[in-house]
Amino acid sequence: MDRQLISRLAHAHHPIAAPLADGSVARLLDRATAGSRDGRALDLACGEGAWLVRALAANPRWRAVGVDLDTRALARARQAAAALGVIRRIGLHHLDAREFTSREPFDLVLCVGSTHAFGGLLPTLAAVGGLLAPGGRLLVGEGFWQREPSRATLDGLGADREDFADLATTTDRVIREGWTPVYGHVSTEREWDDYEFSWTGSLAEWALDHPDHPDAAIAREAADRHRAEWLHGYRGTLGFVTYLLRRD
């Protein structure tokens, strides 16, 4: 079963593809767009465009661009933008985020939960710096170790110990790269639990509702495996931080 399809099904009831509640998303966007009535936002690996659509709905004079490799997710982003009346202010591109270029810089660049598209947090910081206008902001979300990961945790995630660091070290690395955190949010356990139960539950429910679909068994197995990896592996060990950053 295609990974992009699994992701779309799993995020059916939690369109923000990260452990963030609606209130947290709203606060982050408020801070990210504060002080600018007119602005341009870019979401790299935007998926269904949930961040951009919300930003445009709250800021009537902003424009936005979204980039993603999933054509169906982009189609849903267009539908969501049309439903909220912001379709004329958003451009959506079927493109690898690493290949995106723009002659006009952006006031806000987002890459929340998608730094893997660039090979990690630090490569993401290096890649997006040239896309920001002077004084522009970057909203980036990344994992970190809340506590030392066990072998079972690493195996469940398919990760290495070096893939993440603790929160203090992660923040220090960001600062050394020439970025200043001007706001941030650490996802709570409640946000994590809601996200993971929604992810696995939406995928499992699709399998239950489509028992004759050729991918039903695969979807159910993916949901069960992910739930086990979370509950028996990284729950309470893997954290998630969303930084709002400015260049020094």
Image (tube, rainbow, N blue to C red):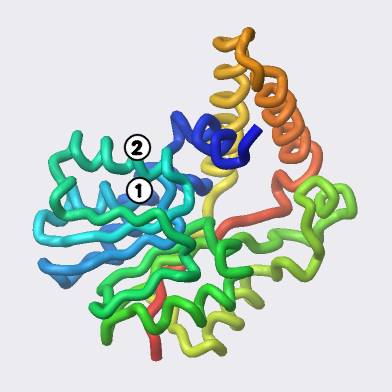
Q: Where is residue 228 in the image (x, y as percent from the top left)?
A: 77, 33
Residue 21: image quadrant is: top left
Q: Which amino acid does label 1 sit on?
A: Gly
Residue 15 vertical position relative to residue 166 in the rendered view, above or below: above
Image point (22%, 67%), residue name: 40
242 to the left or right of 138? right
Image point (39%, 64%), residue name: 110
Q: Name the residue under label 1.
A: 49
Secondary structure, mark 1, is: loop
Which numbered disc covers residue 189?
none
Q: Name the residue under label 2.
A: 76
Mark 2–mark 1 CB contact (< 8 Å): yes
Residue 238 vertical position relative to residue 182 in the rendered view, above or below: above
Q: What residue type is labelled 2?
A: Arg
Image point (46%, 70%), residue name: 99
- Residues packed near mark 1 inside 10 Å, few (<14), some (14 to 19) or many (20 plus): many
Residue 126 vertical position relative to residue 236 in the rendered view, above or below: below
Q: Position of residue 95 (x, y in %)?
A: 43, 59
Disc tally is 2
Q: Who is closer to the viewer here, 209 or 186?
A: 209
| Cα separation between marks 2 and 1 | 8 Å
Say which quadrant the C terminus sits in: bottom left
Say which quadrant the N terminus sits in: top right
Q: Position of residue 51 (x, y in %)?
A: 34, 51
Image point (11%, 67%), residue name: 37
18 to the left or right of 214? left
